[in-house]
């Protein structure tokens, strides 16, 4: 088994994830495909994930590719989580993960007291009013003149790929969507192109390409597959994958053979790579075994009880601090370091945070350093989006 240093592996992954100066690109479709999709449970996350990996990103670029050109689709998939994915990968990602939503669908209807037949009738009616249009939930409800819980029905229809989330109602920070017919949004997409088994194999290979080298635990975590499904997919990839080790780490890492060749040829540099990531960024959410890029002493300040990652500051791929943005009253960017930083690193990070602030608020905003932070593990769910709410 070939062994690599941690620094070597981290630099390799940073390049794959478009974080280094040489791999940053303004091709947001390439980024979305290369990094395993854009995590989109939080409305602002996909925009900030792209901003951290590009040179000249503007918010309308994502809206243009997703909602006008329809090269990207916003769907619930791995781990029952919402992602923005390149349309090329959607058929097998959907087929590989749709069973993960099946029980949720049944339970949801039971809680609503709605039978399957009634649900299907409501969906048919919704699809009729959506023909050639994209509408908000309130507009759909008004068109149908219905007293049913249309919001819940729309969410379920999205999970069954009958309806798809379209552009936000107002701005990029608006959590409310408009909705369209999935079939009209992607008229030439064949969702029956791949079997479930073939789709699982393709999804594991896709994950390895985007995040590898990874452990088996990482694959189980990211895909939402159980270990039996994961091992079967890996067995089917035999010949195109191999195992490596990382110095001073007893875990076994899996990597595509083609990636191993790139890893072996890659030169390690001394250039410092700094990254400002949103909550739920693919990099911080892409792994279950996280000691490669997180000091265990700070784990509870980065992840909440559900394993959701907050807004983070990275140096050479390792999380060294947390940041936050406040939009009420006086807009500002807050930040907190776990340990004291070198002056040069400190100033470079401040400079990047100022740029992020200008991107978010369309104007320069002040910075505030927080000397202390309450761990996320002791706080209420959802505070990964406001990690420095109680800034001290």
Image (cartoon, rainbow, N blue to C red):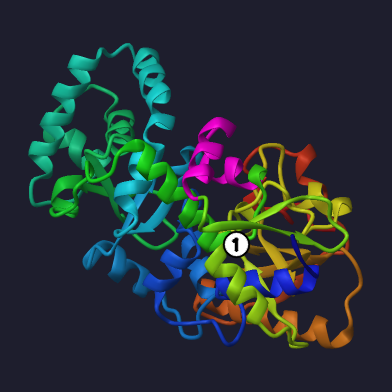
**Relative to the observer, which residue lies in front, 237 or 378?**
237
Residue drawn at point x = 35 percent, y = 74 percent: 61
Looking at this rendering, what residue extends furthest in the right direction?
A: 340
**Relative to the observer, which residue lies in front, 137 or 164?**
164
- Relative side of 112 to 157, left or right: right
Image location (x, y in percent) of residue 196: 35, 37
Predominant secondary structure, magenta span: helix
Residue drawn at point x = 51 percent, y = 34 percent: 229
Image location (x, y in percent) of residue 265: 64, 81
Looking at this rendering, what residue extends furthest in the front direction?
A: 239
Q: Which residues are magenta?
A: 218-237
Q: What quarter of the picture does the N terminus occupy?
A: bottom right
Image location (x, y in percent) of residue 383: 66, 46
Q: What quarter of the picture does the C terminus occupy?
A: bottom right
Q: How many marks?
A: 1
The answer to whether residue 43 shows anywhere in this view is no
**Relative to the observer, which residue lies in front, 221 or 385?**
221
The answer to whether 56 is drawn above or below residue 264 in the figure is: below
Q: Is residue 231 magenta?
A: yes
The answer to whether residue 296 shows anywhere in this view is yes
Image location (x, y in percent) of residue 35: 50, 64
Q: Quadrant of residue 106?
A: top left
Q: Which residue is tagged 1?
A: 278
Residue drawn at point x = 60 percent, y = 42 percent: 221
- Relative side of 246 to 62, left or right: right
Q: Quadrant of residue 100?
A: top left
């Amino acid at each position: 088994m070939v062994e690599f240093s941690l620094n070597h592996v981290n630099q390799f992954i940073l390049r794959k994830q478009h974080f280094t100066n040489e791999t940053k690109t303004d091709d947001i479709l390439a980024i979305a495909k290369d990094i395993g999709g854009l995590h989109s449970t939080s409305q602002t996350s996909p925009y900030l994930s792209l901003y951290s990996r590009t040179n000249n990103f503007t918010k309308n670029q994502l809206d243009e590719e997703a909602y006008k050109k329809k090269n990207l689709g916003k769907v619930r998939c791995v781990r029952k989580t919402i992602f923005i994915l390149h349309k090329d990968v959607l058929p097998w990602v959907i087929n590989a993960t749709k069973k993960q939503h099946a029980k949720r669908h049944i339970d949801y209807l039971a809680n609503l007291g709605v039978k399957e037949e009634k649900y299907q009738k409501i969906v048919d009616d919704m699809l009729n009013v959506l023909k050639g249009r994209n509408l908000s939930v309130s507009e759909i409800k008004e068109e149908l003149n219905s007293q049913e819980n249309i919001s819940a029905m729309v969410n379920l229809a999205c999970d069954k790929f009958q309806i798809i989330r379209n552009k936000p109602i107002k701005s990029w920070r608006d959590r409310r969507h408009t909705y369209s017919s999935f079939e009209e949004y992607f008229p030439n997409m064949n969702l029956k192109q791949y079997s479930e088994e073939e789709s699982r194999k393709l999804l594991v290979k896709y994950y390895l390409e985007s995040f590898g080298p990874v452990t088996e635990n990482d694959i189980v975590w990211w895909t939402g597959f159980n270990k039996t499904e994961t091992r079967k997919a890996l067995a089917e990839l035999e010949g195109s994958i191999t195992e490596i080790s990382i110095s001073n780490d007893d875990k076994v890492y899996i990597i595509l053979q083609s990636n191993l060749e790139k890893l072996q040829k890659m030169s390690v540099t001394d250039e410092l790579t700094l990254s400002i990531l949103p909550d739920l960024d693919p990099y911080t959410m892409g792994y279950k075994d996280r000691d490669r890029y997180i000091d265990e002493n700070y784990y509870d300040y980065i992840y909440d009880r559900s394993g959701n990652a907050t807004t983070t500051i990275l140096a050479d791929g390792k999380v060294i601090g947390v940041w936050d943005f406040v939009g009420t009253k006086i807009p500002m960017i807050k930040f907190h370091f776990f340990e004291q930083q070198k002056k040069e690193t400190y100033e470079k990070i401040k400079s990047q945070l100022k740029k992020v602030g200008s991107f978010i608020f369309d104007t320069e905003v002040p910075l505030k350093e927080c000397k202390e932070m309450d761990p996320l593990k002791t706080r209420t769910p959802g505070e990964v989006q406001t990690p420095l709410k109680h800034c001290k």
